[in-house]
Image: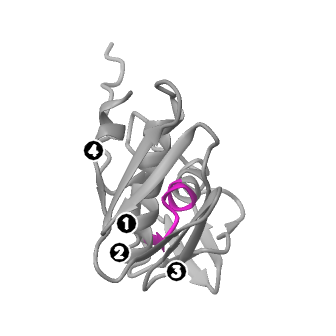
């Protein structure tokens, strides 16, 4: 069994967790998740501590299930956030509802539609902040936006995560 699966999952106050036969419902102030539990995994609730164990032998889904439940609990209580920065002359972002208009040095602006469940805001024209309760959806949306113009290694221009360090290569010398 994995080390992650051995740890108990503490459910904070304000998060309601209900166990069914094969599904688990997690409700919080930000939203609701329903998760189908794998058949080889048993989930037990003792007070406000959740234990995830394998039914028969050590099963690889135990650690995965525990981490997914931890992400869901954090998502409905606090939410997730991803911040992107646009680096380059003339690179701008503007939001209109759930559509981001990106000027990235191409002949036409790139239009990106943000999926339902993710909210987007642009505090400045070179920052994009994505928020949501589903960690996977927020990260996937951020990766798709970054893929429109990833940072290039010679000048560092492009879309990057706020925590990303871009290593600038040295140009050729004669």
Q: Quadrant of the N terminus?
A: top left
Residue labelled with disc 4: 7
Quote the CA–CA distance across marks 1 and 2.
6 Å
- Closer to the observer: label 4 or label 1? 4
Q: Position of residue 123 (x, y in %)?
A: 39, 82
Q: Which mark is residue 78?
A: 2
Tell me which numbered mark, 4 or 1, is placed earlier along the sequence. 4
3D distance between C-alphas at marks 1 and 3: 11 Å
> Earlier along the polypeptide chain: callout 3 or callout 2?
3
Q: Secondary structure at mark 4?
A: loop
The mark nearer the N terminus, 4 or 2, is 4
Q: Secondary structure at mark 2?
A: loop
Instruction: Please name whichever residue, 133 or 167, is drawn nearer the observer in this view of the structure.
Output: 133
Residue carrying label 3: 31
- Residue drawn at x 28%, y 73% is 12
Asked if the residue at tag 2 contacts the one at tag 1, i.e. Cβ–Cβ closer than 8 Å, the answer is yes
| Residue pointed to by mark 1 | 74
Measure the C-alpha gap from mark 4 to mark 2: 21 Å
Q: Start and end of the magenta stretch? A: 128-139
């Amino acid at each position: 069994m994995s080390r992650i699966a051995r740890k108990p999952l503490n459910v904070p106050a304000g998060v309601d967790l209900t166990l069914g036969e094969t599904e688990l419902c997690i409700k919080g102030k930000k939203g609701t998740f329903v998760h189908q539990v794998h058949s080889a995994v048993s989930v037990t609730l003792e007070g406000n501590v959740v234990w995830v164990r394998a039914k028969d032998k050590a099963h690889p889904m135990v650690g995965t299930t525990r981490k997914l439940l931890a992400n869901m609990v954090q998502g409905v209580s606090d939410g997730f956030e991803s911040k992107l920065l646009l680096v380059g002359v003339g690179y701008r972002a503007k939001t209109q509802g759930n559509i981001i208009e990106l000027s990235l040095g191409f002949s036409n602006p790139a239009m990106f539609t943000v999926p339902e469940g993710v909210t987007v805001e642009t505090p400045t024209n070179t920052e994009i902040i994505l928020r949501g309760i589903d960690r996977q959806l927020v990260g996937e949306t951020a990766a798709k936006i970054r893929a429109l113009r990833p940072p290039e290694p010679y000048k560092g221009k492009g879309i990057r995560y706020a925590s990303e360090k871009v290593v600038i290569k040295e140009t050729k010398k004669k």
